[in-house]
Image (cartoon, helix red, strand yellow):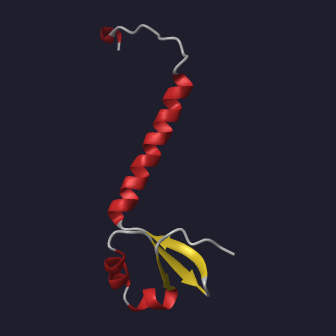
Amino acid sequence: MQSILTDVAVSVSELKKNPSAVMTGAKGSPVAVLNHNRVMGYMVPAELFESMLERLDDLELAQLARQRADEQAVPVNLDDL
């Protein structure tokens, strides 16, 4: 059985009727979109999507910093640039 990872779920038919009402009713939470009682996707408000992307970017930068933590520093003179 497939898990639904949100508190709010709607059918494709319900979503087609009034997508704005679905998002308003979700009150900023993600919405699972179901087709024949199977999750076919998730909708998230723009603000939440942007914060998710920022978080992913932060995680990638943190991983890069950890990978480079043991590298030797190279002295650079700004005037030479």
Residue under the point 49% across and 70% down = 6
Residue under the point 46% across and 10% down = 74
> For this view, does 20 lie left or right of residue 3?
left
Nearest the viewer among 76 and 7 is 7
Picture layout, residue 8 above or below residue 54: below
Picture layout, residue 54 above or below residue 60: below
Which x, y percent locates residue 25?
34, 80
Which x, y percent locates residue 55?
42, 47
Residue under the point 37% across and 82% down = 22
Give the position of the N terminus as an image quadrant.
bottom right
Give the position of the C terminus as an image quadrant.
top left
In this view, the residue farthest toward the front is 7
Which x, y percent locates residue 50?
37, 56
> For this view, does 35 lie left or right of residue 75?
right
Nearest the viewer among 19 and 22 is 22
Picture layout, residue 70 above or below residue 61: above
Which x, y percent locates residue 20?
33, 82
In this view, the residue farthest toward the right is 1
